Amino acid sequence: MTRRRIAFVEFTPSGGLFQFTAQLATALAEQGNEVHLFTGPDPELGSEHPDFHIHPVLPTWHPGDVGTVNKVVRKLRRGVRAAQLATAWLVLLRHLRQVRPDAVVWSAWRFSLDAIGVLLTKRALPSATLGIVAHEPLPRLRSDRTVMKTGPLLDPTFERAWRSMKVVFVLGEGARARVFERWQPSGPVIVIPHGDESALRGNHPVPNAAETDPVVLFFGSMSTYKGVDVLLDAVPEIRAAVPEARIVLAGAAGSVGESELQARSAALGVDARIGYVPNDAVATLFAEARVVVVPYRWANQSGVVHLAYTFERPVVASRVGDIPTVVFEGETGRLVPPEDPHALAGGVIELLRDQAAAGRMGAAGAAWLASEASWKRVAERVDEGFDRAGSTPDRHDPAPLPRVPPPVLLRASGPTVRDQLVTGAIRLAFAVVNRTARRGHYAVCRNLGRLASADAYVEFQVPGGGRFRIHPTDGYWMRPLLVRRTYEPELHRVIGTAVDAGIPFLDCGANLGWWSAFAGGRAPRPTEVLAVEGSPSTYRKLVATAELNGGSFRHRHAAVWSKSGETIEFVESDVSAASGIAQTRPGDATGGRVAAVPTSTLDELAEELAPTSGPVVCKLDVEGAELVVLAASQRLSQGDIALLYEDHGNDPESTVSQWLFERGYTIHAASEDGRLRRLADLQAVKTLKVDPAWGYNFVAWAPGGSAEAAFSALTDQD
């Protein structure tokens, strides 16, 4: 093994990321490396190996240094900490030049300044291998981890920083896939185990879980995405079944309001110990618990699961992200759907009542951790990664294609000067919202856009072909086009490649026609693109999009259904152009305007585009009617249709994907560079769905047909 001088950077000197890094650094030192960890003052773990050197030189702060402060003090503190972080980077660069490491590894970047610091490190140490242990591959808001961070400076600096990474380590296949979907690192992306939390257990005596009282432990920051409210919703059912059960919450308040959490916990009789938990208190908490709950709404991986296994405790966890790869149903714990208090309560009740099962599962978790996820094993994988650093990214792909360019704002206009002023005000308000709350874009469009006339519009150039107009009130479209500067980029190359190859494109549930305008701008003839929309008001806007693009695609007013020539009710909401819902029974509408809409089958529409057998690409977005539509299609089952469909993060069962897998279809994840990665099973689909507020696009077809042949050049086999 090559002896290396490795420098880890962890700005916060306590908490989960610091503990992970310190334990990994120790294991690498035991492998024969010289390891340095640069961090903030008073680190909560020290070095126990002569080749592991901790340098508490960075002028940063502990994550537990929060306290209750008013808004003014919070803003002042934010400014002070920004200055501290800038100073910390300067101090870090000076020390890195002195140490001259062979490799520099980070675990997280939160701000544009961090990405700039990475690029400065690359310039200061041109021969060093730069890497990251990407616990979370995507930048997210600290206050709400379900929301992505974006910005005119953050986006390009993060992209350059990721391109500087010669090796990337992640904690699961789902995280690995997200790295490739969003970034373009310059080296391999390697899955490593999480490792245990032996540094927190020490020599503390821990009884078998079967010998404990019926105590349920939620451990870690009380952030919204971690689902502490879901646990509180489950408490009455747990108590009804096991009256002597005690529920303990231990951790900092995070993004959940502390006073509200305390009040609700008190009302339910929950023991809420809100505040950062020092290391010497962790062992007692886990030793007293019979079961640990991880009711996350989404996650990549969970250090709490590994902490529970370290203390030989079973886990009841949500089936999200890569958690199912470390929580084994019925063996080390129970897996339940996210945001399901009843299911969570059921899993907890079972382990509280069956002490022997709790003890058996806790021991199984500890045994798995020792054999499959020890720090020795982690260090070996990391050393192997350094050996491969700088090699071609190991996705079995050709080099990534250039990223999809952003849509271009062409003009904001209308018959009055006020229309143009309103659009300018919306753009200004978006800039303010992006820098502050990062929420409220819909409210901005609704409140400011209604001041504009009905003929006001904002026009964009669709990347790769076509033009697209929306009214300033349309927050559904204004936010991705003006804020994110992208819309479903993973479908851009899939549809573009198909249309460029002469494959007809069927846009079912076309909305205002974004993808139809894109495909129509590339197709040689309008007859090769057909847009179908059921909502009458949205269809009128779809027609306007076709006219704006000189009739580059055809359009039909119809609801895609299991039979043609029928009439069904279509409910329209004022929320957005995307909110129409087909109803099968009269009187089902619970609000909104109801319109009678003619129906058409998927096969009828495909025949209109391609009368003879041959591939058709169909984007299907029919708001819950997918299974009805798919079950009636012979051309789909024959393999003539490549289906682009959405499996939403709020569907924990992945209903559409499950239906397709059960019938032998192959399903692929689409990435922004145009590659299609075949997914082995339903769990692979669920692993990619980490955000319940997000829709995830997949591509499927029946094997052996013309669709499979048409897309073979883009498809990679897992």
Image: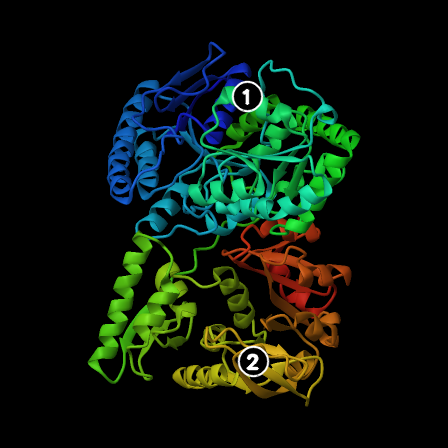
Type of the residue with mark 2: Val
Q: In percent of the image, x 72 and y 76: which residue is there?
A: 633
Which residue carries the number 2 mark?
Answer: 571
**In-image side of 593 versus 624 (left or right):** left
Q: Earlier in the sequence, mark 1 or mark 2?
A: 1
- Name the spot of residue 60 as percent of width and height, x first: 32, 28
Q: Find residue 379 and report its horizontal and vertical position in percent.
A: 56, 24
The image quarter in which residue 259 lies:
top left
**Picture quarter containing residue 452?**
bottom left
Residue farthest toward the left in the current orientation of the protein: 417
Q: Secondary structure at mark 1?
A: helix
Q: Which mark is residue 326?
A: none
Measured in 3D between alpha carbons, the distance from the residue under mark 1 to the one under mark 2, in whole angstroms, is 56 Å
Q: Amino acid at mark 1?
A: Leu
* Residue 441 placement, left or right of 372: left
Front one among 1 and 174: 174
The reply to whether residue 21 is visible in this rendering is yes
- Residue found at x 50% / y 84%: 539
Task: Say which residue appears at 51% left-offset and 63% top-offset.
Answer: 493
| Residue nearest the viewer, comparing 267 with 598 | 267
Q: Is residue 299 visible?
A: no
What residue sits right under mark 1 in the picture?
Answer: 200
State the scheme by which the image is colored. Answer: rainbow
